[in-house]
Image: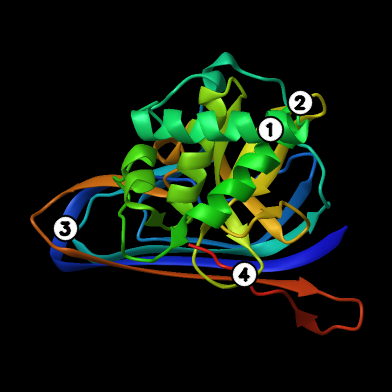
Amino acid sequence: MKKLRFIYRMEIQFSSPVNSHYFALRCIPGDCSRQRIALTEQNIYPADYLARTKDGFGNIRLSGCCQGPHETFGYTIAGTALTRGMEAVKEPLHPMYRYPSAYTRPVPEIAVFAGKAEKLCRKLGKKQNLEKAVCVMGMLYEGFSYEPGSTDISTTAGEALKQGKGVCQDYAHIMTAVLRYMGIPARYVAGLMIGEGYTHAWVEVYTRDGWYGLDPTNNLHIDEYYIKLAHGRDYGDCVTDRGCFRGTAGQVQKIYVKVEEIKNDGNSGGNETAGG
């Protein structure tokens, strides 16, 4: 078990004042069998009204509004997380995680990749869901390139796989799509990982023991250095900031994430891996 300190800041600057701003945020990590969260700061600004609920996937959701004119909107979430190692999240399987979603449609590129993965799994004698998922992760890590700016939040798994490059969202979408094509239930996860930078995305695959996390961007099993924010069928279910407002302003968003280990001697540190 590890103890992590985390801070997650997001701020949007509008080019001119907006009003009647309604928002839904999934920026607070929740408790599960592999993490226990203690918040030290929760600041959403500006907000006339704020309600904390859970969405249909069990993620914490903050809903609120700001009616008056404003040129800045943001939040700071900070706290500590007690995390366990490579342990499955003990939650039941919902059938929706077996089927394609908006970002994970079974286009020809996905079918071809899945066929190659099935062939390799048979050759290596991989029969269990987790074994097959690890095989898919390794293939994706070796055959797909991490390149920031090459995709955007609307890019689907098939589109990213076709061009052969993308970011963590694309790795997670491709792996999720391939696993579902192979008949293996999988879900998309948004969260934080050790280090400094941005939010991250990975995959959870359903096994006999529950949901087991894999990070295809870094070819790693999810361990104590990851904090989950939300899970769902794909990115669309895990958007950390969704809203609408009245106005015609442009937007510039800034995100800052830092996760560090709290060690017994009072010092902190961590590993460096690719995120975002």
Q: Which residue is mark 4?
A: 273
The residues tagged by marks 4 and 3 sit, at their Cα atoms, a distance apart of 38 Å
Disc 3 marks a residue whose amino acid type is Val
| 2 vs 3, front mark | 2
User: Marks 1 and 2: CB-CB under 8 Å?
Assistant: yes
Residue occupying the far top of the picture = 95
User: Marks 2 and 3: CB-CB under 8 Å?
Assistant: no
Question: Element at badge 3?
Answer: strand
Q: Earlier in the sequence, mark 4 or mark 3?
A: 3
Instruction: Specify the quadrant of the image occupied by residue 82.
Output: bottom right
Disc 2 marks a residue whose amino acid type is Lys
Q: Which mark is residue 18?
A: 3
Q: Earlier in the sequence, mark 1 or mark 4?
A: 1
Instruction: Specify the quadrant of the image occupied by residue 268.
Output: bottom right
Instruction: Specify the quadrant of the image occupied by residue 167.
Output: bottom left
User: Marks 4 and 2: CB-CB under 8 Å?
Assistant: no
| 4 vs 2, front mark | 2
The residues tagged by marks 4 and 2 sit, at their Cα atoms, a distance apart of 29 Å
Compared with residue 52, is residue 7 higher up or lower down, i.e. above or below? below
Q: Is residue 243 left or right of residue 246?
A: right
| 3 vs 1, front mark | 1
**Spot occupied by residue 251 in the image (x, y as percentages of width and height):** 20, 63
Residue visible at 43% across and 49% down in the picture: 170
Question: Element at badge 2?
Answer: loop
Whether residue 185 can be seen here:
yes
Q: Which residue is mark 2?
A: 127
Q: Which residue is mark 1?
A: 121
Disc 4 marks a residue whose amino acid type is Thr
Residue visible at 91% across and 77% down in the picture: 264
Q: Quadrant of the N terminus?
A: bottom right
